[in-house]
Image (cartoon, rainbow, N blue to C red):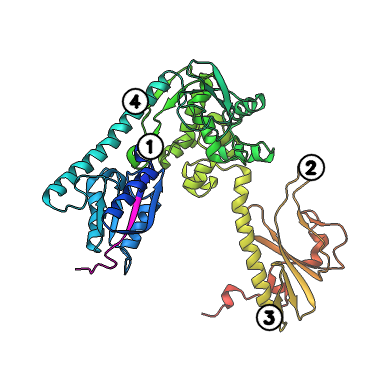
Amino acid sequence: MVQQHNPHRAVMYVRMSTESQDYSTDHQRAKIREYAAACNLTLIREYVDDGKSGLDIRRRPGLTSLMKDVQSAKPDFSYIIVYDISRWGRFQDIDEAAYHEHTCRRAGITVVYCGERFTDDSGPYASLLKSMKRVMAAEYSRDLSEKVFAAQSRFIAMGFKQGGHAGFGLRRLALRACGTPRAVLEYGETKVSSTDRVILIWGPDDEIAVVRRVYALYLDEGYSERRIVHLLNSENISSEFGRPWTQAMVNSLLTNVKYCGALAYNRRSCKLSVPRTRNEPTKWIVKFDAVAPIIPKDLFDAVQVERARRQRRYTKPELISLLQACYARHGRVNAKIIAADSTMPDPQLLVRSFGSLVSAYDAAGLPRSASYAFIDTKKKLAAMQADLLERAETLALAGGATVERTADCHILLLNRAVRVRCDVAVPRNPKRGIRNWRILPRPQIDFTITARMEPATGEIADYFLFSQADLTAKPVYLKASNLDQFAFARHLSLETMFGIPEVSKAEEPC
């Protein structure tokens, strides 16, 4: 058994969740001090949860701190004095209330309810009465929650707004009990009187214009919510909170029915401190024509259909079918066509699903456009370029030269003095003129090795070695008709260029 310390020292715990004078913290303190004096107990400190719900311990720093001190190595008090069971908590699971009290008892600390008839009696009658009181405290919260929900639902049906901010482009107007306007409430302001009711009215004209513009950008221009956020912030348009826009703000603007004239209640709920949940539309309490609509109902509905389309999760077979249908409609397919087609998902969805648009086209069996076909050519060109550089390095080393790689992946430094650039020239097909291979003059380059790609096979046809003196200020254009002119620089293999006899297959060692 845990030994009690300081047997005449006590602490008080007070809690109030409403402005009810019956349970005000001052009233609780007075009763607790009166009890402590009568029992010759010394109150050493108090733990307070002012304006806190008693449904659980999570949002009650006073009770949390108290239980932490109870479970410390050597608590410096032996009693916790509370006004009554409901102040300890209206836990929906009555075992939770008993658990916290049992924790105190195991630490050698007695919980006393000075406003209850059983106070410090620990007999079976007190245990039974405590259980009944805990049930009554929990039931009180459940009953109150139902009454509040019913009242708020009735007010929504009458067209009055229940809690929350107005929303961008709207303002809250407080009405007296008689129905006459009292004042427009700014963000953060509350009603003057509890009998006042609140309705929504239009805000400034510039905010109304922004709301309509956002709907047009989303539906007509195909902007994403993120892109709209970037646009509004780039134009220094303040949100209703006076800070930069976020995607959640734009999402609320596009999905809240108040912008098409309706008020909706119970879209989300967190009754009795359970985790917040989104309710099905069938459970919403909706009042149509409660607000002058900023957005026509048909436009609002069209935006919801578009949002559902953009957020739909497609399987790969579904995406392949959509791509094939898109190709059939337009005769070709690319990112711009996909983005403009209302039946297609966002191109980025295809990228995320297949790794790239090219991979998506391949999976759908679609021909690639010229721009996408060049992607393969670039990959092949990069591989040929790396191979050319490596072979040139190997041959230079075999010829007795020292070779260093430079920061430029096209350039080799021979004998720490001669800079050699290695390039692969691809065939060019101008609209006017004949096919050619361009070799550009490069500053501070002593020699240029150019491998000419054969257009039919994509393989290397021959090699050209030009010195700095051979290349003028203008590019050299190799053509089928002028190859003889550059015979002095032409080599059929890289080995002969470096003066190494090419080994025939018949001479290769077994």
Question: Does the magenta-highlighted stretch encompass residue 4?
Answer: yes
Q: What residue is shown with label 3?
A: 397
Asked if marks 2 and 4 touch (Cβ < 8 Å), the reply is: no
In the rendered image, residue 29, in percent from the top left (x then y), is placed at: 36, 48
Q: Which residues are magenta?
A: 1-13
Q: Which residue type carries mark 3? A: Leu
Tell me how far mark 1 sits from mark 3, CA to CA: 97 Å
Nearer the camera: disc 4 or disc 1: 1
Residue at 79% x, 53% y is 481
Q: What is the distance, in whole Å, between disc 2 and disc 4 at their CAs?
A: 81 Å
Observer-nearest residue: 45 or 494? 45
Q: What residue did someone put label 4 on? A: 150
Identify residue type, mark 1.
Answer: Gln
Residue 378: percent from left, percent from top: 63, 55
Q: In terms of sequence position, does the residue under pointer 1 or pointer 3 come before the other? A: 1
Looking at the picture, which amino acid does disc 4 mark? Ala
Residue annotated with mark 1: 21
Which numbered dot is residue 432?
2
